[in-house]
Amino acid sequence: MTDQAGKLRTLVKNRISTEKTGTENGALDTNPPTKPHFICITSGKGGVGKTNFSINLGIALTRQGMRTLVIDADFGLANVDVVLGTITKYTFMNLMDENLSVENILGEGPEGLKIISGGSGLLNVLDMSEEKLQRIIQRFNELNTLFDIVIIDTGAGLTKNILSFVNASDETILVTTPEPTSLTDAYAMIKAISREPERTKVSVVVNRAETHEEADQNFEKLLNASMKFLNFPIHSLGIILDDYRVKKSVQLQVPFLIKYPNSIASRNVELISRKVLNHNIDDAPHEVKESNFVKRFINIFK
């Protein structure tokens, strides 16, 4: 595993060097690709509506003109496929297949949203040859040119893989509910993030709140604990009020933003999407230096 990590770091270094000096045939690239905004959506525990939120946020952002990709990073569980009622032909692991283009691997979601299924077989990554590592880096760079926003829907809980995604992203959205166990696990996640060398911005979405007041009170509890014990600021991105139509949409396998566009949950997500765009997306594109996904893979091999 250590040898694989060293190999990957060398490949990334060579790729960055090539990008700085020009293309491989010596021509100078005068139009460097822009880097999409990477949003990691995670939670301290399962069952808080994280994947459902990820999909509906992706749809809301797509409606606002953002080229949006949702990656199901809960490897081994095709949660995004289940929520959407789709069966994708290819998964994240197919990014290494030289016979497939990136466009072939991307799954079609609603209203132009693109998805990459998590599928299974993460352990196969540990056996990647240098050629496949090179292919992965190339594919990540291709993704950089295709999307404005990449949403990474992680698994739940505190694992090394999830924290790697968190560290690699531009920001993290932590989904919680007013339940005491959910808040406790959310704080544990915040604590883990606060101890990382490169601490990402953390925004909180309180899901399934009965009232605005309940949501605000629970966010304040998290904020006060985070500042008092961790000296780590968190931000409120918004709330999603409890709405029976969300459950119905899950049963129908149709995102509630599409099935029930006028529901309170849909309006809440639309407001959150506007906050994401207004507060976190720079007007001017910035040059790609190193793919955040590549960073994440490096961390897996450490």
Image (cartoon, helix red, strand yellow):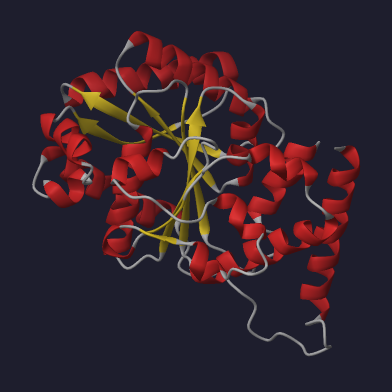
**Residue 210 position within the rendered picture, expressed as x and y whole percent measured from the top left:** 16, 21
Q: Residue at x 55, y 71 (%)?
A: 145
Say above or below: 24 vs 120: below
The answer to which image quadrant residue 298 occupies is: top right
Q: Residue at x 64, y 70 (%)?
A: 99
Q: Seen in the image, is 160 located left or right of residue 150?
A: right
Say above or below: 128 vs 247: below
Q: Seen in the image, is 160 located left or right of residue 55?
A: right
Say above or below: 136 vs 171: below
**Residue 211 position within the rendered picture, expressed as x and y whole percent measured from the top left:** 15, 23
Q: Seen in the image, is 70 located left or right of residue 32?
A: left
**Residue 40 position within the rendered picture, expressed as x and y whole percent measured from the top left:** 50, 42
Q: Residue at x 44, y 40 (%)?
A: 78
**Residue 165 position within the rendered picture, expressed as x and y whole percent measured from the top left:** 60, 40
Farthest residue toward the bottom?
27
Q: Residue at x 32, y 65 (%)?
A: 112
The C terminus sits in image quarter = top right
- For the image shown, how many numbered marks are present on the structure? 0
The N terminus sits in image quarter = top right
Farthest residue toward the left?
262
Q: Seen in the image, is 183 located left or right of residue 254?
A: right
Residue toward you, 206 or 118: 118
Farthest residue toward the top?
180
Residue toward you, 187 or 119: 119
